[in-house]
Image (tube, grey):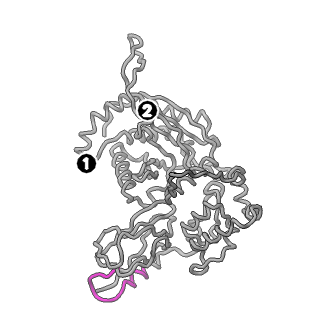
Amino acid sequence: MAEYKLLLPSMGEGVMEATVITWLFNEGDQVKEDDSVVEIATDKVDSDVPTPVSGKIVKILKQKDEVAKVGEAIAILEIEGEGGSTDAQEAKTETSTPDAETIKAIEEPLNPTTTSHVEFSGDLYLSPLVKSIAQQENISESELKTIKGSGLEGRITKEDILAHVSNRGNQPQKETQQQATPVQAASTPPAATSAPASTISVAAGDEIIPMDRMRKIIAENMVKAKHIAPHVTSFIETDVTNVVKWRAKNKDMFEKREGEKLTFMPIFVKAIVKAIQDFPMINVSINGDNIIKKKNINIGMATALPDGNLIVPVIKNADQLSLSGLAKAINDLAYRARNKKLRPEDTQGATYTISNVGSFGNLMGTPIIPQPQVAIMAIGAIVKKPAVLETKDGDVIAIRQLMFMSHSYDHRVVDGSLGGMMLKHVHDYLQNWDLNTEI
């Protein structure tokens, strides 16, 4: 028998480590090749780690809530074969693991004023779990440097920062505020630092439900987005009767030919991509006083998860995909999102986002712009309604398939004219959809 060291695999650009959420097998259990053996969490996404070999788990090296670096062994398996261990594999991984300077360069934020309400320069090594706690507790970098770490090479562990938070309450509030870095003071709105947390009374019979890790990240990102971007929302009602007829005509043929469902989402994405090409200044980000105009059109797709949380996988280079290609990409991302099979890179790089609130029966919504994007569109439910149509013989009332769309945009760089015209172009593309469009 031989030992095989299960290593934490690469999880995409900029992801150097992950926190163990839970092991799906115990020491002594037999596992088969491609079995998912452990659930891990990064700053981007939760995912499973499969084993590339069959064998018995003889030792778990990283326990729940512990952090592992990419390329680090997280478990030892006993497999068929000659004695010894996979030292050669470890050496190969070590040579490809980025050094400290590379890690620092990757993790350095593009724009400290927009990445988080608490910023870290990269001088401190912080695990995703410790960083998340520091951000939730508004602990600045200078304050973190006062914490004596008990981990490897003096690193701050979860126990260290929780102990600091516990003792922190005994320190004067003024002292803590004086430790804020200039970047933090400049980028955090006064209301975010000065408003005291309200005390919520808990009555008999009330249930206290702690937020899970993903819900905490969502909450933090939503608050940050509203603090950073002044939101404006425009609305329009669109006649999508032709879209409904076209899909009804093609969905069975498409499923038989491709083995894929044909939903409305690829049609909506296609219209949005064409409108972005008409108005490329909607496909931008803000970096300080600079506007970064994005070359690629990567569409984020808000997806509800079975546990009630939300994730936004990204359709990369959506402008280069046909309707058929969009349908396949959307179905694949949605399936993997709901089954925790997304890779970290699947949720990175979005330049514009769409949210289908109509899937929940809602007529319209006012979505929050995900940073660092500057706009997001919400698609409402398609409803049959009487509508006035202009014909050569005069106006008539007919039953039509109507749908509301709402477009939220960042008023720092997107004015009402740009945001409204972009929405109108999406409306026009959908309302004038060609029934002979090929797929």
Q: Which residue is most to the left?
A: 256
Q: Which mark is residue 259?
A: 1
SS for callout 2: helix
Q: Position of residue 277 (x, y in %)?
A: 49, 40
Instruction: Decide: is 20 above or below 316.
Output: below
Quadrant of image for the C terminus: top left
Say left or right for 152 vs 8.
right
Mark 2 crowdedness (10 Å alpha carbons): few <14, some 14-19, many ≥20? some
User: In terms of sequence position, does the residue under pointer 1 or pointer 2 come before the other?
Assistant: 1
Pick the residue in front: 117 or 192: 192
Q: Position of residue 381 (x, y in %)?
A: 41, 34
Instruction: Decide: is 43 above or below 304.
Output: below
The amino acid type found where label 1 is placed reads: Gly
Q: Which mark is residue 375?
A: none
Q: Which residues lie in the magenta part?
A: 77-92
Q: In the rendered image, which residue does mark 2 sit on?
A: 429
Instruction: Decide: is 396 above or below 430.
Output: above
Q: Position of residue 54 (x, y in %)?
A: 28, 75
Q: CA distance from mark 1 to mark 2?
A: 27 Å
